[in-house]
């Protein structure tokens, strides 16, 4: 199960069938398109935004990711590097700005994976329908 979630997030794949992409581009640092999502999965028909405002919940996931990033970098700085506070804060602020597109995508994909589980039976369901017609 964790392997399925990890695969979906890292490869930008539909959480239900793992066949088509959730975001239109695989490059998170393409700043003009990194936030553009497909409305539904081309393979299994899963509607990604289930209701208006569905992805507001991903903001809480993003917040959790940033708190985790803060704790990890703060511990490394405090116990290994021991830099000045202003140096650490400068590093931290620049790092969250640089990695914002990545955090945005990871939090949305994680939010989707919380509610939608991988189902092998959903793979190529549309292709099977098309072939039978
Ligand atoms: Zn799908």
Image (tube, helix red, strand yellow):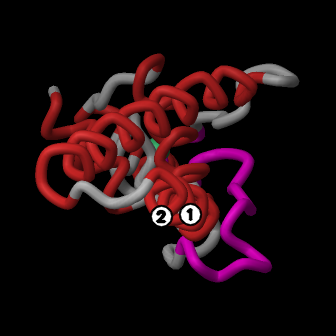
Number of the label disc, if any, that sits on residue 29: none
Quadrant housing residue 11: bottom left
Q: Which residue is mark 1?
A: 90
Q: Position of residue 37 (x, y in %)?
A: 70, 56
Q: Which residue is mark 2?
A: 87
Viewer can see residue 37: yes
Quadrant housing residue 117: top left
Q: Position of residue 100 (x, y in %)?
A: 61, 58
Q: Is residue 42 above or below residue 65?
A: below
The magenta stretch is 28-45
Q: Is residue 44 within the magenta segment?
A: yes
Residue depicted at 58% across the width and 78% down the height: 29
Lateral position of residue 74 relative to residue 93, left or right: left
Task: Depth check: give the residue in front, 76 or 44.
Answer: 76
Q: Is residue 56 above or below residue 84?
A: above
- Whether label 2 lies within 8 Å of ligand 1 gets the answer no
Circle 1/circle 2 CB separation < 8 Å = yes
């Amino acid at each position: 199960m964790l392997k399925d979630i990890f695969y979906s997030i890292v490869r930008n794949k539909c959480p239900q069938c793992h066949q088509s992409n959730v975001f239109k581009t695989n490059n998170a640092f393409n700043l003009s398109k990194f936030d553009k999502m497909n409305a539904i999965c081309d393979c299994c028909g899963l509607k990604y935004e289930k209701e208006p405002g569905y992805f507001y919940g991903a903001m809480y996931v993003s917040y959790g990711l940033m708190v985790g990033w803060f704790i990890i970098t703060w511990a490394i700085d405090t116990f290994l590097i021991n830099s000045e506070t202003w140096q650490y804060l400068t590093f931290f602020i620049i790092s969250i700005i640089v990695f914002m597109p990545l955090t945005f995508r990871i939090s949305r994909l994680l939010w989707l994976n919380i509610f939608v589980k991988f189902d092998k039976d959903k793979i190529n369901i549309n292709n099977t329908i098309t072939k039978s017609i």
